[in-house]
Image (spheres, rainbow, N blue to C red):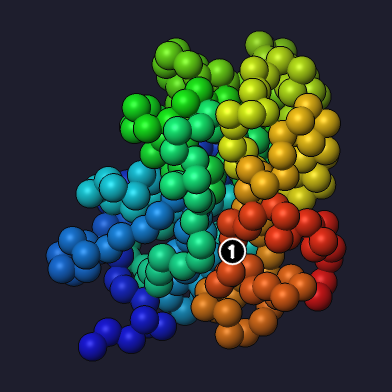
Amino acid sequence: MHNPDRPFEVEVVERVEETPTIYTLHLRFTDPGIERSYRCQPGQFNMLYLYGVGEIPISIVSDPDSRGPVEHTIRSVGRVTRGMEMLRVGDRIGLRGPYGRGWPLQEAEGRDVVFVTGGLGCAPLVSLIRYVVERRERFGRIVILQGVKHSDDLIWRRQYERWQRLPDVQVLLASDVGGPNWPYSVGRVTVLFSQAAIDPDRSIVMLCGPEVMMKSSIERLLAIGVPPEVIWLSIERNMQCGIGHCGHCQLGPYFVCHDGPVFHYPALRPWLGVTGF
C-alpha cells in the first residue's frame, strides 16, 4: 500500500519560461497506474520535492479533468524554486498530493462567476477559470479582474485575450506601473471595479493574491452590494507539510494547508490580514 506521505516520481515533459523569474513545469507521473488514478480539484496544490534540496507547495493550474501532464507555475524566489528553475525536459522530481480544499464548484454553478486576482495569485484561480470556460453551459457570465505590479509581470496575456473574445466574458487588466505599450488600466486591481459588470444578486466571487489586495477588493464588493456569503478566497501561508501536522501555516483555528487554502470569507474574516498565529 502506498504511503500518502511519500512522493510519487514525476518527469518534466515540458518547461515554459513565462518571464525571467516565472516558469511553468508540465509533469507526468512515471507510473502509468498513478497517472490514470490521479485526480485533483481547482484550487488544490501539490508538494513538489526537488531531491536533496527540499519540498514546496505549488498550486495546480491545469484543468482537473485533463488527462495530460499536471501543470505548475512557479516564481523563482527561494532555494527550492531556484533549484527547480534549472530543471529541463526529462528531469525527475517528487510529487505529493493533491492537498487542501479547492474552490466551491457546486455553489458556483448557475451563477455569474467573478474572479479577482493579483500578481502570481492568478495561478490558483487559473485552473478554475479553465474549468468554468470549458463548461460554459453550467455557469453564468464570467468577469475576470487581474492586477499586477508592473506590466512586465503579466503572464498568460494570450490566454486572457482568448478568454476576452468568448461570449459573456469580461476581462479587465491593470498594472500599478504600465510600460510604454501597456493598453490596459493603470493602478491597483481595485480601479477595475468601476468598469466591471457585476450583478450582486447573481454572482459568486473568487479571490486570490496578496491579503491586503483581497481586503481592499472585498470592501469594494461589499460596497456594491455583494453579500459576504458568496465570497471565497485562497490564501498563502507558510505551508510545509501539506497535511496539517507541522503547524507552520496555522491561522487562528485553521491550518491553511488542510482546512484551506480556499476559505469561505465569513469564516476567515476575523483572521484575514492577521500575521503569525
Query: Residue placed at 67% from the left, 47% from the top?
Result: 229
Q: In the picture, which quadrant includes the C terminus?
A: bottom right
- What secondary structure is marked by label 1? loop
Tell me residue 71's x, y (percent): 39, 49
Asked if residue 164 lies left or right of residue 273, the reply is: left
Asked if residue 15 lies left or right of residue 191, the reply is: left
In the image, 192 versus 34, the foreground residue is 192
Q: In this view, does 147 lie above or below 249?
A: above
Q: Can the viewer see residue 235?
A: yes
**Mark 1 highlights which residue?**
260
Tell me residue 188's x, y (percent): 79, 29
Query: Which quadrant holds residue 249?
Result: bottom right
Query: Residue placed at 70% from the left, 52% from the top?
Result: 265
Tell me residue 14's x, y (percent): 32, 46
Query: Residue placed at 41% from the left, 65% from the top?
Result: 98
Q: How crowded is mark 1: few (under 14 residues within 10 Å), some or many (20 or more)?
A: many
Residue type marked 1 = Gly
Asked if residue 276 lies left or right of residue 79, the reply is: right
> In this view, which residue lies farthest toward the front?
201
Q: In the picture, which quadrant includes the N terminus?
A: bottom left
Query: Which quadrant holds residue 6?
Result: bottom left
> In this view, which residue lies farthest toward the left?
32
Query: Residue placed at 46% from the left, 67% from the top?
Result: 99
Q: Can the viewer see residue 150?
A: no
